[in-house]
Image (cartoon, helix red, strand yellow):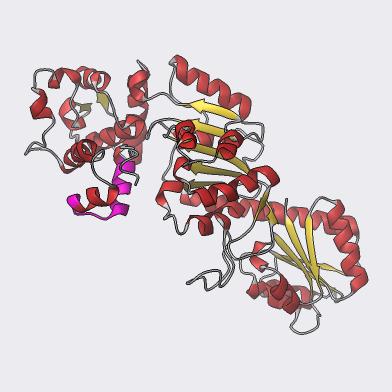
Amino acid sequence: MSQILIIEDESVIRTAVERLLTRRGYKVSATESVEEAEQKYDLQSFNLILTDVRLPGVPGTEVIHRAPGVPVLIMTSYASVRSAVDSMKKGAIDYIAKPFDHDELVLLIERTLKQEKLGRKTEVLKSDLDKSYPVDGMVGKCPAMQEVCRRVTKVAPTDSTVLIFGESGTGKELVARALHEQSLRKDAPIVTVNCAAIPETLIESELFGHEKGAFTGADSSRTGLIEAAEGGTLFLDEIGELPLAAQARLLRVLQNGEIRRVGSEQSRLVDVRLIAATHRDLKQRVQEGEFRSDLYFRLRVVELNLPPLRERGADVVELAKFLLEKTRKQLNRSPMTLNQAAIETITTYSWPGNVRELENALERAVILCEEELITPDLLAIESAHSTAGKPTSTLNQPAGDLSLEEYFRQFVLENQDQMTETELAKRLGISRKALWERRQRFGIPRTKKGAS
């Protein structure tokens, strides 16, 4: 639901426009001056501001500078070219002359809001240029992936909440984007949030926004990521890591479509579709008191279970060929193919990091390859055949010739059940944030012990 602010000192006009836009389904607020508007509202929370030029105090055009990024429509009794040009030079998106026809005003507002929504989507797409996911057709013919595709097709056109389960690296974000792109909200943004990547002390502020002075360092009001997804889709990845306090706030969004910024006493209506994902067993976390049962049942309207790559059979070869072609185009390299030995290596490897690990291996191979054939040594992985003859004691110890990535993976997997994340990071000589980033890159999920 788009939110519109009207700033007009003539009460008859202000009331008439407010009623007109409310009947059209907009959420409307109204004041008689820029100063009053600034005192009562966060100007940047509106999708559009409609203001008169001549107002008590500062002129209406002043709101353009006080609400950067918000489209401003000017109402003026002076329908001269000069007044229109002056307003546009100051940053107004358009103007309308009084007295105006109601239908004309509604059409102008609808056009402006459409442009504003497309502008927000463009900004989101700019930040996602490096993500060339095959949204229109997920790669995979195994029964489990075919079932995922069928469910995506059925649930995408609805506004139902979707909960995606799967190990790290299985493509949960890809499925979320497919749901969004095939929905009625595809012209609005999809906002992706990794709940595990945001410090617990900041998660509520990031999601729900905050008011100026809400806490130390809050020098100005800030719109949260949920509001940024207005009209579109909010994808909460690793929702199992969401703190209990934030879970309670999120439940209110699902139940009533309302959010309240940190430090605010007023609630705001939001129109977003929620998709969540996790690699954790949420039912077990509910039993352990780490996840709210009411939120869990609200989330699992529709469940999608992504199979790990090791259970997808022949899909791994098809996916490898697809990713190889995508990667070599991104790196501007000539056509390449996997030789038979490389295909055998790919099919016999367990891929603990799933699709993400496969993509990383192929990217490394493309970079290092000097000819047209990708060979097993370029993939830098070990198949089941190549490790079959080695003693277990040797496999469990860090070898001197391991790459940094291999050493990191082996060290974390062998020690994460005995150490906390802080202890692991200290032993590796890196920060907790760097440890988390490498876990994500290499597809190594955290255990219950390591999460503490």
Q: On the picture, is 321 further left or further right than 95?
A: left
Q: Residue at x 53, y 42 (%)?
A: 235
Q: Residue at x 64, y 74 (%)?
A: 66
The residue positioned farthest toward the bottom in the image shown: 57
Question: Where residue 264 sits in the image (x, y, percent)?
Answer: 64, 65
Vertical relation: 400 (above or below) 425? above
Quadrant hosting residue 48: bottom right
Quadrant hosting residue 385: top left
Return the residue nearer the eye: 260 or 84. Answer: 260
Return the residue nearer the eye: 333 or 301. Answer: 301
Q: On the picture, is 142 further left or further right than 34?
A: left
Q: Is residue 279 magenta?
A: no
Question: Where residue 442 sits in the image (x, y, percent)?
Answer: 29, 39
Question: Where residue 123 sits in the image (x, y, percent)?
Answer: 54, 54
Q: Main secondary structure of the magenta part?
A: helix
Vertical relation: 113 (above or below) 158? below
Question: Where residue 408 sits in the image (x, y, percent)?
Answer: 20, 42
Q: Is residue 432 magenta?
A: yes
Quadrant hosting residue 383: top left
User: Is residue 74 in view from this perspective?
Assistant: yes
Q: Residue at x 41, y 45 (%)?
A: 130
- Magenta stretch bounds: 427-441
Vertical relation: 61 (above or below) 45? below
Q: Residue at x 56, y 27 (%)?
A: 152
Vertical relation: 389 (above or below) 28? above
User: Is residue 86 in view from this perspective?
Assistant: no
Return the residue nearer the eye: 5 or 239. Answer: 239
Return the residue nearer the eye: 322 or 224. Answer: 224
Question: What count of labels does the image hold?
Answer: 0
